[in-house]
Image (cartoon, rainbow, N blue to C red):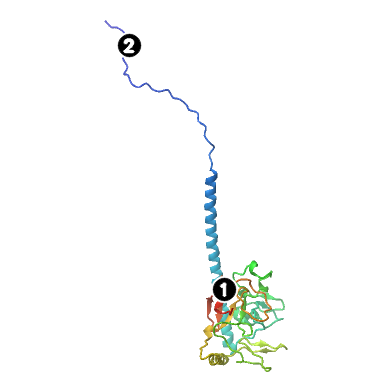
Amino acid sequence: MQTNQPSMKPRGPRPRPIVVMRTRFAPFGFTLVELLVVITIVLTLAALTLTVITKARAKADNVLAITNMRQIGAALASYLSDNDHLPTFMDTGVSPAISTANPYTQAYVLQPYLGLNEPTSKIQYAQIFRAPGLKPDNMGGKKNWYDVTCYAMYNSDYFTPTKAYFPKGVVTDDSGMDVGPFGRVSGNGSPIDGWRSAQFDAALSKYTAENGGRIATLSKVPAMLEINAKYPSARGSWPWSVPKKPLRGDRVNVLYFDWRVESVPPRFFYSP
């Protein structure tokens, strides 16, 4: 005889009811502190990047400046070889102007040796004489780069180097005036040639005799150098506008009479 009995189920932990909790979430975003930290990091990286770029650009400018100066030195050496004397320039300050109206600028005289455009009555400006790194805030108030004289040729009337230099009286004109290595143009416009090789030898010998046997060499005498107002490179009347501060920081580039280019501290040349 069957009896209906309820089935026995195994007992166990009773399931808990699922309870849906309502929570209030804050909107997603950065806190003010986090934003400030991120901004600080970005600005720091930007400053470091700008510093690296500025240094790289300055280095590139200096490399180009030295390359240009070497080309000018090669042009001077070629002129001396072809003509047996240095060229004659009107002024100590280097001019990039090329024009038939003024045949004694550095750019005009060296035009064939630098591959520059043929001179015409219209003034042109040779970029090789534009100093790399010259910026508007360093142009002494001038608007055009070619109105700023960044280079000068050696002339004992102006320069007071602290190292070996050429003495006066080695070459004189008919009136007894001193003629520097790059000649001169007389008051009536007549040019006087620059020095010949023998006159360089005479200048070095005279310097040695006048300075107690101190030996002077062409490798110590600047033919052309960068100039600026911070480290005065001139004495007496200087009619040209120059950069307010050095173009290479604590260095200036110099082309010597042995046609070697060197970057040296500005005070290497200039007397206080």
* Callout 1 amino acid: Ala
- Quadrant in the rendering for residue 156: bottom right
Residue 17 location (% of width, % of height): 42, 22
Q: Is 15 placed above or below 41 here? A: above
Q: CA distance from mark 2 to mark 1?
A: 107 Å
Task: Give the camera-side residue of 222 and 78.
Answer: 222
- For the residue pair 237 and 84, the one nearer the viewer reads as 237
Measuring 54% from the left and 62% from the top, which residue is drawn there? Answer: 53
In the image, farthest residue toward the top: 1
Percent coordinates x, y for residue 204 in the rendering: 54, 90
Helix, strand or loop at label 1? It is helix
Q: Which residue is mark 1?
A: 65
Left or right: residue 102 versus residue 160 is: right
Figure disc tally: 2
| Residue 174 image offset from top left, x and y in percent | 68, 94
Q: Which residue is at the front of the view, 230 or 88?
A: 230
Q: Between disc 2 and disc 1, whose residue precedes?
A: 2
Q: Is residue 51 visible?
A: yes
Res 70 seen here: no
**Label annotation for residue 6:** 2
User: Which quarter of the figure has residue 118?
Assistant: bottom right
Name the residue at the bottom extreme. Answer: 174
In the picture, measured across the screen, residue 97 lies left or right of residue 5, that is right
Measured along the vertical axis of the image, is residue 10 above or below residue 206?
A: above
Decide: is 124 above or below 21: below
* Quadrant of the frame with the N terminus: top left
